[in-house]
Image (cartoon, helix red, strand yellow):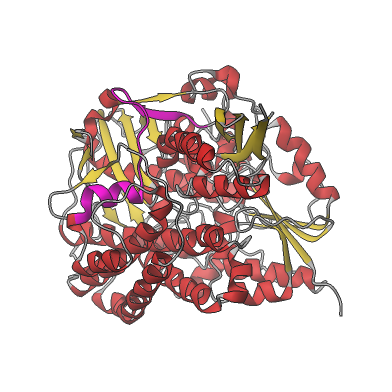
Amino acid sequence: MKNRTIKVEYLARVEGEGALFVKLKGDEVVDVKLKIFEPPRFFEAFLRGRHFSEVPDITARICGICPIAYQMSSIHAIENAFGVKVEGALRALRRLIYCGEWIESHVLHVAMLHAPDFLGYADALQMAKDHPEIVQLALRLKKAGNAIVALLGGREIHPVNVRVGGFYRVPTRRELAPLLEQLKTARDEAATLVRFVGGLEFPDFERDYEFVALRHESEYPFNEGRLVSNQGLDIDISQYDAHFVEEHVEHSNALQSTLKARGAYFVGPLARYNLNFDKLSPLAKSAASAAGLTHTCNNPFKSIIVRAVETLYAFDEAIRIIENYEMPERAAIDLEPQSATGYGCTEAPRGICFHRYKFDEQGLVADAKIVPPTSQNQQTIEQDLRAFVPAHIALDQNELTWRCEQAVRNYDPCISCATHFLRLEIERE
Amino acid sequence: MHAKPKLAVWKFASCDGCQLSLLDCEDELLAVAAEIEIANFPEASRAVVRGPYDLSLVEGSITTPHDAERIHQVRRASKRLVTIGACATAGGIQALRNFKDAREFISIVYATPDYIHTLNKSTPISDHVFVDFELQGCPINKTQLIEVISAFLNNRKPNTPPHSVCIECKRRNNVCVMVARGTPCLGPVTHAGCDALCPSYHRGCYGCFGPMESPNTRALSTQFAKMGVQDMELVRLFRGINAYAEPFRKESEAHEK
């Protein structure tokens, strides 16, 4: 019986530092470890004692790719603690800035981090030599997403304009107007990107996942909704702790989150799509079907199509918001701190990002808990590899290693976030 | 024909935002890639070309025994080493641990502290190896990043002005948020580079570019006190993204308790 090990000491084209280790005895996988060696940064610890108004600027620093997700989840949790709900144009602007983040993050992953796997390139720059039109198109799309975040937030990375209660300054209709033309052109190009990724070759791989995402009564989810799954979960976000548990395993600096009742679950674009297909815009639905998707998808390799579809949706939604925008009288609503606990959960590009804060009467943080998407997907990623490797055991070592990396990249894991994750080792003894 | 200069990008404890700034140069990325060989950049590529590297960009701070060793390997493999961002230059937001007991922090976040190997302090790269140039900012300014890469590849000094955010504010014709609105602002002591972003959005600067050259933090604290800023608030103001940069660290410690 031949034993093999697959090792990737430093997973490339993911955000943060992780490794992969798979050990095979004959055709059987005996061990899979998604190792997260990104150093811990202790955000939950040093948030203690900070004033509520400082929290969004600090939580943004958990991730350079999805700072909006951390700002939005923390802000919603703080507002929840203080009994405030932001509505109207301010709420619409929050959806708009989230559209911008989904676009820049999804396009970065689709074109620059994931597509090279399907086409056999080491990176997007090499891919650009043979497919210049698609890489240039992706850069234009990404730029349009960044333009939304920069206009509303001040800059693409760690925006400064988002605050508890609303914004520091809201844009005028005149300021937003020039974005429209760029976004409408980009929306057409996003449809081209969906067709391109729909034409890639996908491994025949499906599993029976428990998908978890937010669900809102009338919208594709960004900031709000109930937490639902395809296996019966349907809870208010304040019930998160009663249903989910985080575990600390030795091989990972990121905690692993599971459902108490059933274990591993799947968050992110595929989960959102499967649970909220009916809430996509008509344009996004028709692009999905033209790319070969139905209203459900259980093949994680096809998450690249779903990300492209969500990108198109985000352009559609951003255009709708700007066209309907009326500048609010005030940039933010006032709130009074109180001794209370608040919950926030929003849909980061990679999936649900849960925050819980306890405040004292002065509005200082007494306790914080932050659960990023990647820590929630860790066990699902490991289970995917357990199922994927035996079916592809005939591949040579290099090819199998690359395929395993690709299977991990299906999740666009964000390791820096997860430790507030990844190297591949496949061991064949 | 000369070989293209080799660029490497290295990551230590950080959020990846500063290296993302390079990928966010949508208009310049393909042009930059035509002039230099991206020889080691894990976030962007699987391919790794062996060193030595003409220019290394280092993101993130040193927080683990392993990383304290690794930075010396990076230095040995690099002709020039430039730090990018507040983490690599000043220890970053994770340097907030430096003011507390790190063991206590571990027990707050992790159920099994024994699994965690970390140092008590988060330190800048220059505490460990010689650094040729430090580019400040959380995140860095991508135009400045292109300038720094271009300068080093052409053997000249980067043009990144060391003055304060106040100068940028005046250039943008912003009304001073401290004078007109009574909003505490770190602009007078903070390094330029953001183009006075926060005041332009009607808020005070929170110092994400770190201290300027010779900042008078004492004078600013005196002014804050006159405006009614309490010591506790003042400590938190200086103790943010660049808490362990010396001028900010000393000022926060002077007002603690």
Front in this rendered view, residue B101 or A300: A300
Total number of numbered discs in the rendering: 0
Front in this rendered view, residue A94 or A193: A193
* Quarter of the view holding residue A336: top left
Front in this rendered view, residue B133 or A63: A63
Residue B118 visible, this orientation: yes
- Does residue A276 appear left or right of residue B133 in this picture? left
* Quarter of the view holding residue B35: bottom right
On the image, the x and y values in percent for residue B248 come to 60, 44
Residue B228 visible, this orientation: no
In the image, is residue B35 part of the stretch drawn in magenta? Answer: no
In the image, is residue A267 part of the stretch drawn in magenta? Answer: yes
- Image height of A38 relative to A339, above or below: below
Front in this rendered view, residue A110 or B152: A110
- Does residue B203 appear left or right of residue B137 in this picture? left
Quick one: quadrant of the N terminus of chain A? top right
On the image, the x and y values in percent for residue B76 come to 85, 49
* Residue at the front extreme of this rendering: A1
Residue beneath the point at 16% across and 54% down: A87
- Image height of B219 relative to A148, above or below: above
Q: Which residues are magenta?
A: A254-277
Residue beneath the point at 35% across and 57% down: A306
* Residue at the left extreme of this rendering: A217
On the image, the x and y values in percent for residue B176 come to 43, 65
* Quarter of the view holding residue B189: bottom right
On the image, the x and y values in percent for residue A333 come to 21, 52
Residue beneath the point at 56% across and 44% down: A404
Quick one: quadrant of the C terminus of chain A? top right
